[in-house]
Image (cartoon, rainbow, N blue to C red):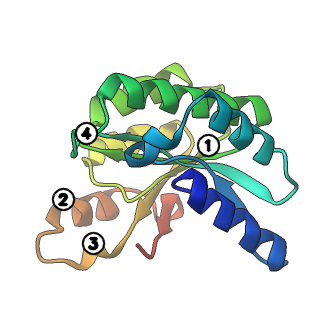
């Protein structure tokens, strides 16, 4: 999964080297400073490669205030539109941005072909809403932590068929 222009290059190289590896290409909100019209055009070209299976990891992250919200929203929308255009699923990152992420995903509802809400950390209600929209809920190791009560509740409340296990 790409998280920056550089990691997208690495991801693509791995997908070309190994027949069993596929790539997701995209720029994570914390690496948006690496995106401009030129690098976005390059990213768009990469999505046309045969072994590109998704656009991601993309989204919003308001935990760190390094990148202004409006800039994150702009590039999130552009990458979602790219996924829509190419009919690719998405890998969504959302941290401390539940409302804005959900609002944008609802705007795009019916225009995207699903994907994963990566490293999910919100409520059961939000998880159910994403599932209704056709997304899987990504669950990582936090579910095993003592302070992972909220995520445990989500996992208990949603269908097992809607959960994707993650390693990070």
Give me the residue at 58% from left, 58% from top.
Answer: 6
Q: Which tag, 1 or 4, sits closer to the chain's start?
A: 4
Q: Secondary structure at mark 3?
A: helix
Number of residues whose C-alpha sits closer than 10 Å to that of mark 1, classed few (under 14), some (14–19) or many (20 or more): many
Q: Nearer the viewer, mark 1 or mark 4?
A: 4
- Residue 29 shown left or right of residue 47 in the figure: left
Say whether marks 1 and 2 touch (CB < 8 Å).
no
Say whether marks 2 and 4 touch (CB < 8 Å).
no
- In this figure, which residue is indicated by the disc labeled 2? 150
Say whether marks 1 and 4 touch (CB < 8 Å).
no
Give me the disc on residue 114. 1
Q: Which tag, 2 or 4, sits closer to the chain's start?
A: 4
- In this figure, which residue is indicated by the disc labeled 4? 62
Number of residues whose C-alpha sits closer than 10 Å to that of mark 2, classed few (under 14), some (14–19) or many (20 or more): some
Q: Nearer the viewer, mark 2 or mark 4?
A: 4
- Between the residue at mark 2 and the residue at mark 4, the CA separation in whole angstroms equals 20 Å
Q: Which tag, 3 or 2, sits closer to the chain's start?
A: 3
Q: Secondary structure at mark 4?
A: loop
Q: Nearer the viewer, mark 4 or mark 3?
A: 4
Give me the residue at 46% from left, 48% from top.
Answer: 28
- Residue 154 shown left or right of residue 108 in the figure: left
Q: Is residue 1 visible?
A: no
Quarter of the image where one finds residue 33: top left
């Amino acid at each position: 999964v790409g998280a920056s222009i550089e990691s997208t290059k690495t991801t693509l190289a791995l997908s070309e080297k190994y027949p069993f590896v596929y790539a997701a290409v995209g720029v994570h909100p914390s690496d948006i400073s690496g995106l401009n019209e030129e690098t976005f055009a390059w990213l768009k070209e990469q999505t046309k490669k045969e072994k590109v299976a998704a656009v991601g990891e993309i989204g919003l992250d308001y935990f760190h205030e390094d990148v202004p919200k409006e800039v994150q929203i702009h590039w999130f929308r552009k990458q979602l539109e790219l996924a829509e255009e190419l009919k690719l699923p998405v890998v969504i990152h959302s941290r401390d941005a539940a409302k804005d992420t959900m609002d944008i995903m609802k705007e795009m509802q019916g225009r995207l072909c699903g994907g994963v809400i990566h490293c999910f950390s919100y409520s059961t209600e939000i998880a159910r809403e994403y599932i209704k929209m056709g997304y899987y809920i990504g669950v990582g190791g936090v579910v095993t932590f003592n302070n992972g009560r909220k995520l445990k509740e989500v996992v208990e409340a949603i269908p097992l068929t809607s959960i994707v296990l993650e390693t990070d």
